[in-house]
């Protein structure tokens, strides 16, 4: 039975960062099993790869995991209905559900994690599953490709979350927002997502000279020569296990973070902000069933 939660302002959970990290690691191990059983290529990316390189595990103040999958395997993962073991659930955008992201996530359905978002979106602890797509070698067209992707991504987020927010019209730029709202009323979230998906895949990742996570947080920095990602994949230690890494982790991390072995200032050492966290009850399953 799913537990209904009333989100309270300034909620402070007694769940520790270490407990969240352990839960995320369990999800990653489940994904690794799925990938091996279904011959799906993937690798650690973003802050997860940085944590593996600098800390041999999680960045101490981080509490999520990012993985990247070449587009061909990513689409196969989402269309072949791979089997997840209890209590894990793989979710992607579906116009008939309340899922709000344009990329996939693997959740622990026996937990509850409510992010501090504009709308009440509740799921469990998760790992992010990003597609690695191809883009243009020419810098101008690569930048244009990225700008179009980001514009469509913002429209998608705007359609899914912002317009549903009760305080939408109580903020700045009201006139502009009303215009955007009116325009978006002619388009469904499904149409915007399909357009985004088409633009992401416009360059075949198998032939592209430049590739990257176009839905990532680092903008154009995420787009790199393909030999940084592909080639002879390496493995890297993360906690007590080894997981796939891009072919050239050093060049990848340098492109994103610069001197990535240097710790950031204290004010930037923050994880995800949660409105509610519960590792004992599930949004999809009752965690008490784990041992039954």
Image (spheres, grey):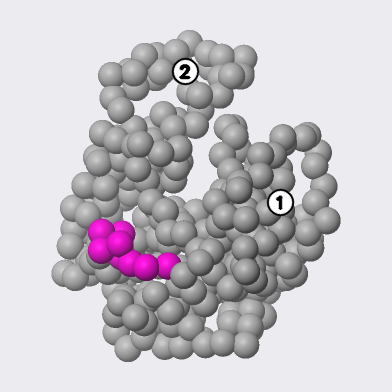
At which x and y percent is residue 76? 25, 65
Local crowd size for mark 2, using a 10 Å CA cut-off: few (<14), some (14–19), many (≥20): some
Farthest-out residue, front = 292
How far, Cα to Cα, is label 1 from label 2? 32 Å
Q: Determine the image quadrant of residue 25.
A: bottom right
At which x and y percent is residue 229? 35, 76
Identify whether 224 is placed above or below 163.
below
Name the residue at 19% across, 70% down.
Answer: 206
Q: Determine the image quadrant of residue 180.
A: top left
Nearer-the-camera pick, 229 or 61: 61
- With 151 as the anchor, is 63 left or right in this view? right
Q: How many numbered callouts?
A: 2
Mark 1 or 2: the one toward you: 1
Q: Quadrant of the C terminus?
A: bottom right
Local crowd size for mark 1, using a 10 Å CA cut-off: few (<14), some (14–19), many (≥20): many
Q: Which residue was labeled with disc 1?
A: 277
Identify whether 155 is placed above or below 173.
below
- The region drawn magenta spans 77-84
Name the residue at 37% across, 46% down.
Answer: 93
Identify whether 177 is placed above or below 201.
above
Q: Which comes before the other along the chain, label 1 or label 2?
A: 2
Which labelled disc corresponds to residue 177?
A: 2
Nearer-the-camera pick, 268 or 155: 155
């Amino acid at each position: 039975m799913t537990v209904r939660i009333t989100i309270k302002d300034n909620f402070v959970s007694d769940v520790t960062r270490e407990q969240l990290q352990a839960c995320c690691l369990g999800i990653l191990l489940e994904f690794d099993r799925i990938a091996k059983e279904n011959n799906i290529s993937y690798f650690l990316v973003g802050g997860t790869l940085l944590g593996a390189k600098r800390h041999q595990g999680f960045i101490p103040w981080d509490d999520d995991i990012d993985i990247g999958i070449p587009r061909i395997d990513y689409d196969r993962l989402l269309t072949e209905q791979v089997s997840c073991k209890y209590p894990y659930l793989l979710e992607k955008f579906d116009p008939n559900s309340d899922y709000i992201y344009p990329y996939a996530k693997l959740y622990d359905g026996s937990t509850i994690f409510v992010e501090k978002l504009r709308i009440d979106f509740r799921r469990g602890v998760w790992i992010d599953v990003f597609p690695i797509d191809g883009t243009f070698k020419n810098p101008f067209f690569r930048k244009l490709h990225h700008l179009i992707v980001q514009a469509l991504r913002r429209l998608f987020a705007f359609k899914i979350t912002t317009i549903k927010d009760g305080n939408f019209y109580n903020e700045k730029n009201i006139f502009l927002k009303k215009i955007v709202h009116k325009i978006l009323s002619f388009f469904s979230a499904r149409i915007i997502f399909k357009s985004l998906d088409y633009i992401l895949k416009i360059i075949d990742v198998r032939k592209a000279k430049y590739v990257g996570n176009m839905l990532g947080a680092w903008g154009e920095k995420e787009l790199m020569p393909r030999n940084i990602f592909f080639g002879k994949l390496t493995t890297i230690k993360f906690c007590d296990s080894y997981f796939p890494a891009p072919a050239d982790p050093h060049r990848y991390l340098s492109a994103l973070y610069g001197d990535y072995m240097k710790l950031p200032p204290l004010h930037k050492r923050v994880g995800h902000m949660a409105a509610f966290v519960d590792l004992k009850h599930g949004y999809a399953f009752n965690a008490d069933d784990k041992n039954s």
